[in-house]
Image (tube, helix red, strand yellow):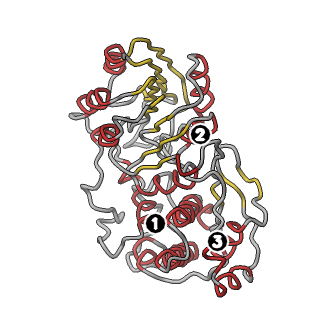
């Protein structure tokens, strides 16, 4: 997914700092702001029992798909239904490819999950509330997706909802399918990067036909049901898990004023499928403006927010990633680690700056590069 703040490019550095400090590759590792799960996947691969949390629902279903399963779902109930078994198996086979931090573009083969995705991939598109609100040719005039792709997203998500309501797929299978659709839809979105606005013309990549990919769950020696995925406020979760023996907490919070709820509102709507419960707002069709406003993206609340987070931590080790353009200063971040940790390793890593577009008259980027702070600490007991 084209996700701001994804730590995919930082995974080698994260693994290195954990190894440098001999953090045991077992026990519970909590990814508190998991996003689309890149680091949670690394921690699961490393051998940890992983708890992944993010209060955005599209991120939650993505982490259910990657962390809450150890292998592709089988869809046993769906295939035990004679009508659906015949219907799905009669659909033309699609070239379904895997997607995870380790598997990119690897063929899935004839696994039942690939057959289900092939069926969904072959569905004829149809109209509906999502298409009308957000797609080319819809009543609202917004252009987040080309017409053909918008019609197909509507049809695929409607079908997933129908199966779930009929009890033909369970909650995990439903989450996996939704996550696959979210990942695939993002690849053909008509945006520069995020969903704060759509492009005025449909770009070439957005004209490409939507093709469903299969999120590849990360295998683990722990049973899948022991890994846990949450969708709640990070501080609230820490307070609720106070009796859990956490080996490691990884913290990758928002670092600037941009709220993820606004930047990814469309993926949230595809995941929740709740257009019967809100009216898209403004030119860009935003959700409720007060929905999920993070204190870590508010300049007047960020320092106190992080202090409360550190006060609530109960873990052997903490690993924190941040950015030099963040609302919390480097000095403040160092101060928190010095106060709450007995050992600290503060690393600065240079990255090419993310650009959603080119410099222009009313927007000139400050620099071509930024620095990522990767901070490890052994907490005071």
Residue designated by label 1: 270
Residue at image position (66%, 54%) is 71
Residue at image position (55%, 29%) is 351
In this picture, is 242 found above or below 146? above
Residue 370 position in % (x across, y down) = 48, 28
- Nearer to us of marks 3 and 1 is 3
Answer with left or right where residue 63 lies relative to residue 139. Answer: right
Quarter of image, res 322: top left
Q: Quadrant of the C terminus?
A: top left
- Distance between mark 2 and mark 3 Cα atoms: 26 Å
In this picture, is 70 found above or below 33? below
- Nearer to us of marks 2 and 3 is 3
Residue 213 position in % (x across, y down) = 65, 61
Residue designated by label 3: 76
In this picture, is 122 found above or below 328? below
Residue nearer the viewer, 81 or 370? 81
Residue nearer the viewer, 93 or 203? 93
- Distance between mark 2 and mark 1 Cα atoms: 27 Å
Secondary structure of residue under mark 1: helix
Do callouts 3 and 1 mark residues in contact (Cβ within 8 Å)?
Answer: no
On residue 185, the disc is none
Residue 186 position in % (x across, y down) = 54, 59
**Which one is earlier in the sequence, the residue at label 3 or at label 1?**
3
Do callouts 2 and 1 mark residues in contact (Cβ within 8 Å)?
Answer: no
Secondary structure of residue under mark 2: helix
Secondary structure of residue under mark 3: helix
Answer with left or right where residue 109 lies relative to residue 270. Answer: right
Residue designated by label 2: 44
Please identify the residue farthest to the left as the structure is shown: 300
Crowding at label 3, few (<14), some or many (≥20) Cα neighbours within 10 Å? few
- Distance between mark 3 and mark 1 Cα atoms: 25 Å
């Amino acid at each position: 997914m084209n996700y701001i703040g994804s730590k995919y490019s930082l995974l080698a550095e994260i693994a290195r700092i954990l190894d440098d400090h001999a953090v045991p590759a077992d026990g519970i590792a909590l990814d508190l702001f998991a996003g689309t799960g890149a680091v949670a996947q690394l921690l699961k691969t490393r051998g940890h029992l992983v708890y992944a949390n993010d209060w955005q629902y599209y991120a939650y279903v993505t982490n259910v798909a990657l962390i809450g399963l150890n292998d592709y779902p089988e869809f046993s109930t769906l295939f035990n239904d004679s009508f659906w078994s015949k219907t799905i198996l009669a659909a033309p086979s699609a070239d379904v490819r895997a997607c995870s931090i380790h598997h990119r573009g690897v063929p899935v083969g004839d696994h039942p999950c690939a057959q289900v995705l092939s069926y969904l991939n072959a569905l004829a598109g149809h109209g509906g509330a999502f298409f009308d609100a957000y797609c080319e040719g819809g009543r609202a005039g917004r252009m987040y997706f080309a017409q053909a792709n918008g019609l197909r997203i509507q049809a695929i998500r409607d079908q997933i909802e129908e199966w779930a309501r009929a009890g033909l797929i369970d909650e995990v299978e439903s989450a996996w399918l939704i996550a696959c659709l979210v990942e695939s839809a993002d690849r053909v979105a008509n945006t520069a990067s995020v969903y704060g606005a759509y492009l005025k013309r449909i770009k070439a990549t957005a004209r490409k036909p939507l093709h469903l990919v299969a999120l590849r769950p990360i295998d683990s020696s722990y049973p899948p049901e022991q890994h846990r995925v949450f969708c709640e406020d990070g501080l609230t979760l820490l307070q609720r898990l106070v009796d859990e023996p956490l080996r490691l907490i990884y913290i990758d919070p928002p670092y600037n004023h941009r709220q993820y709820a606004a930047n990814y509102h469309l993926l949230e709507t595809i995941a929740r499928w709740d257009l019967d419960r809100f009216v898209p707002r403004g030119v860009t069709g935003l959700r409720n403006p007060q929905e999920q406003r993070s204190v870590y993206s508010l300049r007047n609340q960020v320092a106190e927010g992080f202090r409360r987070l550190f006060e609530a931590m109960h873990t052997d080790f903490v690993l924190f990633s941040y950015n030099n353009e963040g609302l919390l200063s480097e000095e403040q971040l160092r101060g928190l680690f010095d106060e709450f940790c007995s050992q600290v390793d503060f690393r600065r890593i240079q990255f090419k700056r993310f650009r959603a577009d080119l410099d222009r008259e009313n927007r000139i980027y400050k620099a071509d590069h930024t620095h990522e702070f990767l901070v490890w600490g052994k907490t005071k007991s």
